[in-house]
Amino acid sequence: MSTELTLKIAGMSCGGCVRSVSGVLSALPGVERAEVSLERGEANVRFDAAQVTPQQLLAAIDDAGFEAALPA
Ligand code: 9UX
């Protein structure tokens, strides 16, 4: 069963950052789709909650050099 979440991401400055974030999210087992918006500073992610947790999504983005947070 897939879940959808829109994460807030700080620190993205160009399309390369968008590709980096898209890449690290897509590489996680259980991530089905990741749509990253530079303008909004967000990533909409659809994932299988049985395979990956929201905290793992945040950690992967942080490890890539950005600062991710759950929606307020
Ligand atoms: Mo663009 Mo981002 O030159 O990590 S790729 S600012």
Image: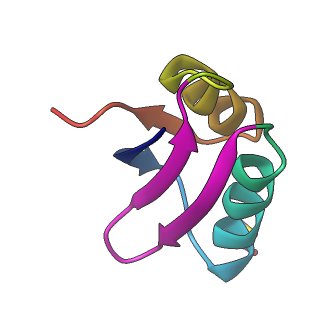
Where residue 63 appears, as percent x and y from the top left, is 75, 30
Q: Which residues are magenta?
A: 30-49
Q: Residue at x 75, y 55 (%)?
A: 26
Of residue 63 and residue 71, the one placed in the foreground of this image is: 71
Q: How many marks?
A: 0
Residue at position x 79%, y 39% from top? 28
Say whether residue 36 is left or right of residue 52.
left
Q: How is the image coloured?
A: rainbow
Name of the residue lying farthest toward the front: 1
Is the stretch drawn in magenta largely helix, strand or loop? strand
Question: Is 70 covered by the magenta stretch?
Answer: no
Q: Is residue 52 above or below residue 61?
A: above
Say which quarter of the image contains residue 13.
bottom right
| Magenta stretch: includes residue 32 | yes
Image coords of residue 25 (percent x, y): 70, 48
Quadrant of the displayed image that contains ligand 1: bottom right
From this view, report whether residue 61 is shown above or below residue 44.
above
Residue furthest left in the image: 72
Residue toward you, 43 or 18: 43
Q: Is residue 15 left or right of residue 36?
A: right
Q: Residue at x 60, y 62 (%)?
A: 33
Say which quadrant the C terminus sits in: top left
Between 65 and 69, the one lying in front of the other is 69
Position of 35 compared to 8: left or right?
Answer: right
Q: Is residue 7 above or below residue 34?
A: above
In the rendered image, residue 12, in percent from the top left (x then y), is placed at 55, 61
